[in-house]
Every structure is written in C-alpha cells, then in structure tokens.
Amino acid sequence: MHATGTFEVKVTPGASDNPAFSRMSLDKQFHGALEAASKGEMMSAGDPAKGSGGYVALEQVTGTLNGKKGTFILQHSGVLAGGVPQLTVTVVPGSGTGELSGLAGQMTITIAGGKHSYDFEYTLPQNK
C-alpha cells in the first residue's frame, strides 16, 4: 500500500546531559493520505555546517492512514556524510494500534524549497 502527502514540523531544542549531543522535541502535522499528528524526541551529533552528522528519533503518530484509525511509532536513523544525507524511517514492529495494528513499512521524507513531504510504503494484515 502507498500513502503520500505533506507535513509541517516544529522542532524545540531541549537539554542534554552530554555536550556532544543535541536533543530536540518534534511536533508534526501530516496531511494527505496520512492525516495525523505526531510527537517525538530526537538526538543529534556532528557538524552539519561542515557536512557531517547523525541523528536518531522516535515519534508516535496518531490519526488516520488511508481512512484507518490508530497510532504507530516511526524510528528515524539518519547520517550526513560529505554533505550527502542518508535517512531511514521505519515503522517500529508491533507499535500499530486500532485499525493500524500489524502495520509495517518505511517512509521516505523529502525536503525541497523549505517544504516537507512524505512517501509511505506500508503493509497491513488483510483483516484490517
């Protein structure tokens, strides 16, 4: 199955016990085939201005996916090497609830012209 759309994200800096890490809270609003809100936490390190760094994040998404209601958790793992980003965003196995129970998949995030969009390839059990 497939879902596409746009999203807005608000990033709020937080405190970290380690000066090598930056911590941020995420607040997103998804539009399109995924009509949802999410809350998440992100940790990052490195020097993006020099073209290097990495981040990990978890976010809980609550809403509807192609008309099916529930929640699920996305796990992000990203690196920036030589100015080239690589990002993996995966549904945490077993995290789906409600009509999204059994959800699996990966999301691609694109940022162009300051706008965020997603392309979500996913599966759901047949009885959902």
Image: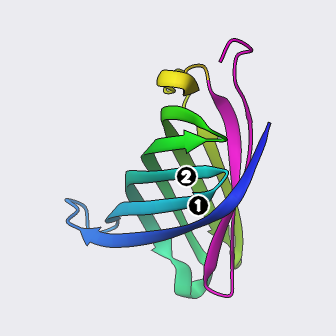
Residue 8 numbered mark, or none? none
- Please, what secondary structure does the residue beneath circle 1 have? strand
The part of the image, by quadrant, that contains residue 53 is bottom right
Q: Residues within 10 Å of mark 2 (few under 14, many from 20)?
A: many
Tag 1 residue: 31
Looking at the figure, which quarter contains the N terminus?
Answer: top right
Position of 124 relative to 11 (above/below): above
For the residues labelled 1 and 2, the Cα–Cα distance comes to 5 Å
Q: Are marks 1 and 2 in contact (CB under 8 Å)?
A: yes
Q: Nearer the viewer, residue 20 or 110?
A: 110
Q: Residue furthest right?
A: 1
The kind of residue on which mark 1 rests is His
The part of the image, by quadrant, that contains residue 85 is bottom right
Q: Main secondary structure of the magenta part?
A: strand
Magenta range is 103-128
**In this rendering, would 80 be left or right of 21?**
right
Q: Residues within 10 Å of mark 1 (few under 14, many from 20)?
A: some
